[in-house]
Image: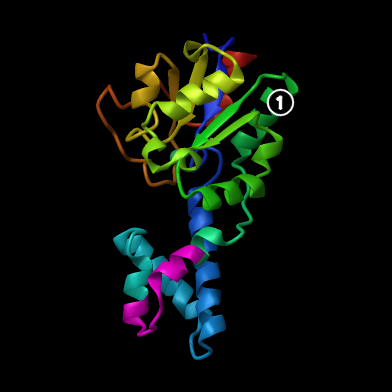
Amino acid sequence: MYKTLIPIFDLDDTLYCEHDYVRSGFKSVANFITSKNNTANAGLIYNNFINVWLSHGRGKVFDIVCENLSIPFDIAKLVQVYREHQPKLELYDDAKEVLSYFNTKKIPMGLITDGNSTMQWRKIKSLKLDELIDVIIVTDDLGFEYWKPNAAPYKKAAKILNVPIEKCVYIGDNPNKDFVTAKKLGMHTIRIVRPVGDHAKTRLNKTYEADKEIYSLIELLENWS
Ligand SMILES: [Mg+2]
């Protein structure tokens, strides 16, 4: 069914584990605080970041930890250090295999990702996706209003790939925003369910869920081989 389709991927938690990025960002911020304040202990700060993240989610980690440990810091600066740090990331094994398969078969590929532009491009470079994927759209480069589920990035990807949008399949992990517009535009959609990830347990109604669910990207290959 998918043989002639052009795959367009999401990035975070689809091609690599976003929690790896979060941990690496926390490490950079803990080191940054210690570099500016030599009474601070980077290991202690890092462990606090992890504990608050696991109990309260990611949103207020820096505020809560700085308050708990009485570290007076400009939170906006810490967010900037987090977003601008250079991560060392690895693709999921199945992503590595599938991207290299499509590459060998000369099947063009796309990527559409949301998130702060500097941060997303650093992830992309770290994973060397710019060497593997033909069309990369960081929606933040178009403007905050163009983040998914805005239709513009999907249309733009299909246009640059030079294929009708109905010939594209969007592969992502987040039913809140990955599939709803893609489906309205006539794209095929596939949800990858990872054991780890912010959306692993999210289940929404049919409008938001993908046409198909898979548990490893390797399952894609049977449709293209
Ligand atoms: Mg994602």
* Residue at which label 1 appears: 103
- At a point 46% along the width and 32% down the height, the residue shown is 172
Q: Is residue 23 above or below residue 126?
A: below
Range drawn in magenta:
66-80
> Residue 224: horizontal and vertical position, in percent?
61, 15
The answer to whether residue 133 is above or below residue 90 is above
**Is the stretch drawn in magenta largely helix, strand or loop?**
helix
- To which quarter of the image does residue 85 belong? bottom right
Say whether residue 144 is left or right of residue 23.
left
Q: Decide if residue 179 is on the left or right side of residue 43.
A: left
The residue at 44%/42% (across/down) is 195
- Residue 14 visible within the image: yes
Task: Point out the quarter of the image occupied by ligand 1.
Answer: top left
Q: Residue 183: image x %, image y %? A: 37, 19
The residue lying furthest to the bottom in this view is: 39
- 189 vs 156, nearest the viewer: 156
Is disc 1 placed on a helix, strand or loop?
Answer: helix
Work out which residue is located at the far right of the displayed protein and give it: 104
Q: From what the image shows, is residue 154 above or below residue 15?
A: above
Residue at left offset 62%, top offset 52%: 89
With respect to residue 155, does 40 lie above or below?
A: below
